[in-house]
Image (tube, rainbow, N blue to C red):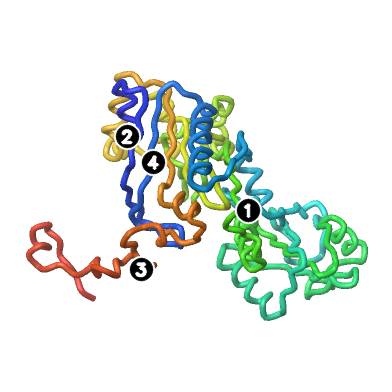
Amino acid sequence: QLLMIAGLDKYYQFARCFRDEDLRADRQTDFTQVDIETSFLSEQEIMDFTEEMLCKVMKEVKGIEVKRPFLKITWEDAMNRYGSDKPDNRFGMEFVDLGPMFAKSEFPVFQNVETIKGFVAPAFHASNKEVKKLTEFVKKNGGKGLVVFKMQEGTLSGPARKFLSDEDEKALIETMGANDGDTIFIVADTWRKACTALGALRNEIASQKGLKKPNEFSFLWIVDFPMFEWSEEEGRYVSEHHPFTMPKTEDLSLLDTDPSKVKTNAYDIILNGYELGGGSMRIYDNALQKKIFQILGLSDEDIQNKFGFFVDAFQYGTPPHGGLALGFDRVAMLLAETDSIRDVIAFPKNASAKDPMSKAPCPVDEKQLDELHIQIEHD
């Protein structure tokens, strides 16, 4: 962004990055990004050249013609339908909103909750032992619990069946489109927790059923992300992406009245349920940038300490600009039709963020600690 402010109209680089996050099969602590920033281009123009680049890669590497334009799904729609901001749409099992149906239910689990959502797993039979494991899986992913109905000979069975009237049973079967041999999974909770937990379950069921074919490729964009997310832990708003993301022009008035409803000009490119990369149009107005910082609870001192070098540059005149960064290693992982990023990185770290070859990280000697003025306290 500083290069855009300095007068360069565009740039790209292969950037080595470090991310201090929990490791998963598709993550490494250090990785490579194809990082792009450009002035005076629109969100759609950035999407267009990204699609063109990815289609060229798919043609030259895999011999596959990918149709353009890629599908676009809003963040809210993706969460409502798939329970994920990086949905895999190669298979069905989309969510159904069951809130209106169970608004007056006597089932305690369905009472006093914000959202009730469910999906059907076709031809999926789970034993009671497996249902218990899936319930624990939902809880691990933030849900309160899991309601399960098995469809057999035109009727539903399961511990929660006794709370349904015959009319409720019939309505649920029709609404879900369930057939004999199917299983209905339902989560009732706050909207975000219900969506997220059910989304994790949807992916787990798809993996168990073998619905994720590595040689199938489905690209899509997720757009219109929320600007802020409320953090219960910190008691304040935090950025959904980052604090330099441009809010949608039509939502600017909401910054003063209801920041939770502000949407942004942010966009993520998704392939087969993995985030290949993401970007946004950036804030280029100093007053607006300061307002965003204030909503995030940052004092003037905090702003100067954390972002002083950046906000100071705004006084020299900032052009409209935006960018996008693709995870180079993750792209390679999917092109190689593997589900582990370690398969495409030389000398990868293991799940404990250690290098098995060099044994790093390892203890350092006292002299090095003294030079850095670091003292180790032992319990």
> Which residue corresponds to the image point at 47% horizontal and 46% vertical from the top-left?
236
Assess disc 4: are there few (<14), some (14-19) or many (≥20) residues with their C-alpha within 10 Å of its C-alpha.
some
Q: Is residue 179 above or below residue 249?
A: below
Q: Please state if 373 lies on the left or on the right of 264 as rendered.
A: left
> Which residue corresponds to the image point at 52% horizontal and 57% vertical from the top-left?
337
Picture quadrant where residue 73 is located: top right
- The reply to whether dot 1 and dot 4 touch (C-beta < 8 Å) is no
Q: Is residue 141 above or below residue 11?
A: below
Q: Which residue is mark 2?
A: 300
| Between discs 4 and 3, the one toward the N terminus | 4
Q: Which residue is mark 3?
A: 352
| Between discs 2 and 1, the one toward the N terminus | 1
Assess disc 1: are there few (<14), some (14-19) or many (≥20) residues with their C-alpha within 10 Å of its C-alpha.
many
Q: Amino acid at mark 1?
A: Gly
Q: Which residue is mark 1?
A: 83
Picture quadrant where residue 107 is located: bottom right
Q: Amino acid at mark 4?
A: Val
Q: Please state if 81 lies on the left or on the right of 345 as rendered.
A: right
Assess disc 2: are there few (<14), some (14-19) or many (≥20) residues with their C-alpha within 10 Å of its C-alpha.
few
Mark 2 vs mark 1, CA separation in Å = 37 Å
Mark 4 vs mark 3, CA separation in Å = 26 Å
Q: Which residue is mark 4?
A: 34
> Which residue corresponds to the image point at 57% horizontal and 62% vertical from the top-left?
142
Mark 1 vs mark 4, CA separation in Å = 28 Å
At numbered mark 4, what does the secondary structure look like: helix, strand or loop?
strand
- The reply to whether dot 4 and dot 3 touch (C-beta < 8 Å) is no
| Between discs 3 and 1, the one toward the N terminus | 1
| Between discs 3 and 2, the one toward the N terminus | 2
